[in-house]
Every structure is written in C-alpha cells, then in structure tokens.
Amino acid sequence: MTRFGTLTAALAVGLIPVAAAAQSMSPMRGEVNSFTDVFAVRVYPANPYDQKIKVEIHVYDQDFQPVAARISPSAFQLGSQASRPVLVVVPFGGAAERKVRICTESIPFPNQQTQIRAQICGKFFGHRKS
Amino acid sequence: MKLFRTAFGAALLVACLDKPALATTQNVIFNGTISPTCTLVIATNGTMTVSPDLQTLSSHNSGGSAGTVTLTTTGGVSLSVDPVTTTTVPAADTTSTTWTPTYSSAGAHSIVETGSATAISTPGADLVSVHLAGTKGGSNRFANGNYQATVTLRCE
C-alpha cells in the first residue's frame, strides 16, 4: 500500500496526464519525483486512424537501448480514434535520476513491401528523492 | 419613537433613490499549457523497384514510390528515421545489402531529403515522404523474389 501510494504520488507530482484522441501519445515530456527505487509514468497512446491498429509500448534509454520497465499493457489493439492509458514503471537502477524514452509504436499497414513503423517517443526524467 | 423610526426609514429610502447600484468586475483568468506533441499518420507504404543493373532496389527507381506520412506537431520535436533492421529477402539472395532510409518533408516545414534527425521548432502540418534504397556492391545482384523492409519514422 505504501508503495502504491508513493507511485501515485510520483504520478501526481510529475505529470498531468491528459488524454487526447487526436494525438499518437501524450504527454511527450515529463519530470517525475519518486521516493522509491522506481518512478511511474502514465501515457495515453491514441489511434488517429479510421481502423483498429496494434500498438506496442517500448521504453528505451538515451542511447535507445531497451530498459527493463514494467509496462501495463505493453501491446494491445486500439480502436479507431481511441486512446487508452498505459502505466510505465521505470527502475532507477541505483541512479539518482534517469532519463528514458517511452515510445508508442505501430505498423498500421503491415504486409507491404516497404512498410513504415510510426514511432512517437516521449522523453521523461525521473528524480529519486531521499 | 415609532414616528421617529418611520421618518428615519422614509428618509433613508429617499436618500437611496436615484443612486446607481455599484457594479464590481472581476477578471476570470484562463491558463493553458501545451507540451510538445506529434501525430504521425501513415497514408501509404512505399514501393521499391530494381534498377536495370540489379544492384539497387529503391523507391527512387522508376516505378517505385515513397511512403507518405502526415505529420502534425506543435513544434519542439525532432523527426528522424532509424537504420533498417527488419528485412525479408528471398532465399536466393545470399549477399549482403546496405539499406538506406531517408525522408523529406513538404508543408509547414520544408525538409530536404535526409537520413539525419531534423529539429522542428514551429507548429504545422506536413506531408513526409519516406524513401528506402537497398544497394549491393561488387558483382552482387538482387535476386528474383519478394523483398520487404520496415522503416521506422520517429517523432520525439
């Protein structure tokens, strides 16, 4: 319960998550203060297409190396013009602060010769408070 | 005493007549903050065709076409393409291919075709063209069969 409360506080301190149907992901910037060894970010991927698409959420560090974050859910189908919240919990990994990219990825038209993956990445900065 | 009260009340009433009601105004302030946002809507995927010497498979070649993406942004973002890592080639193609993704933009922001990241500082909408070229060196040639590659277009 304490952990949950801290996570909730971390979300409240750093971000004001606002869902917006016409955006691929919001917010795209944020700073989060946390009193635990993780920080949490809630993002809202959105589907601007007139068709259902598969969306994946990935977390990368500044060098675009994957980060072992907990993503709930990490992959899902998103209906046309819809958005939904995704909770991302990022470990500090022993550091006092950590910058990560949280990316929404989709290939809306697969099975083509040259297919395009659209990737919208937000930059988030976590500060660990003692 | 009663008479005094009545007279006083009447006098007060008369005094208040002809006096305009005092109006007060108060400002209502609205604030709004927009953080950098970006929307990518893929309109079409691209098509690659092979060059006469069979050493280039590209969307720039005759008969090929770029993929098109609509970009809408507030500004304060960066647009880029990733190196191509996901490809499917026919079994007959056993030689290496160098894949080069590029993009250009027309609309609110004019971006000359590039493979590097471009900072976009102002708001607006654009049509982004995404190209992909695969090249083979030496005596290597593209083979008969189906090729597929995925280009990642990133807005961050």
Image (cartoon, coloured by chain):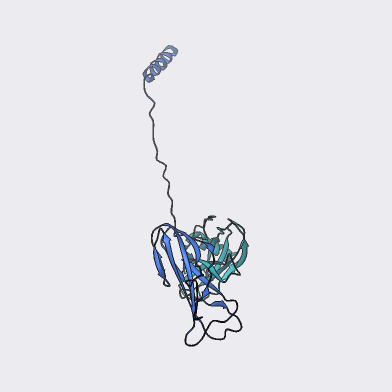
Q: Is any atom of residue A31 visible in this view?
A: no
Picture layout, residue B7 above or below residue B149: above
Picture layout, residue A23 above or below residue B7: below
> Among the chains, which one is blue?
B
Percent across and percent down for residue B128 are 46, 63
When asked about the image quadrant of residue B6, the answer is top left
Tell me the residue at 61%/67% (across/down). Answer: A75
Q: Is any atom of residue B105 visible in this view?
A: yes
Percent across and percent down for residue B140 are 51, 86
Percent across and percent down for residue B120 are 40, 63
Left or right of B110? Residue B154 is right
Instruction: Return the residue nearer the eye: B148 or A10.
Output: B148
Give the residue at the far bottom of this rendering: B139
Instruction: Return the residue nearer the eye: A53 or B136.
Output: B136
Give the residue at the far front of this rendering: B52
Q: Colour of chain A?
A: cyan
Give the residue at the far top of this rendering: B3
Percent across and percent down for residue A56 are 58, 67
Instruction: Return the residue nearer the eye: B15 or B8.
Output: B15
User: Image quadrant for the N terminus of chain B?
Assistant: top left
Left or right of B155? Residue A55 is right
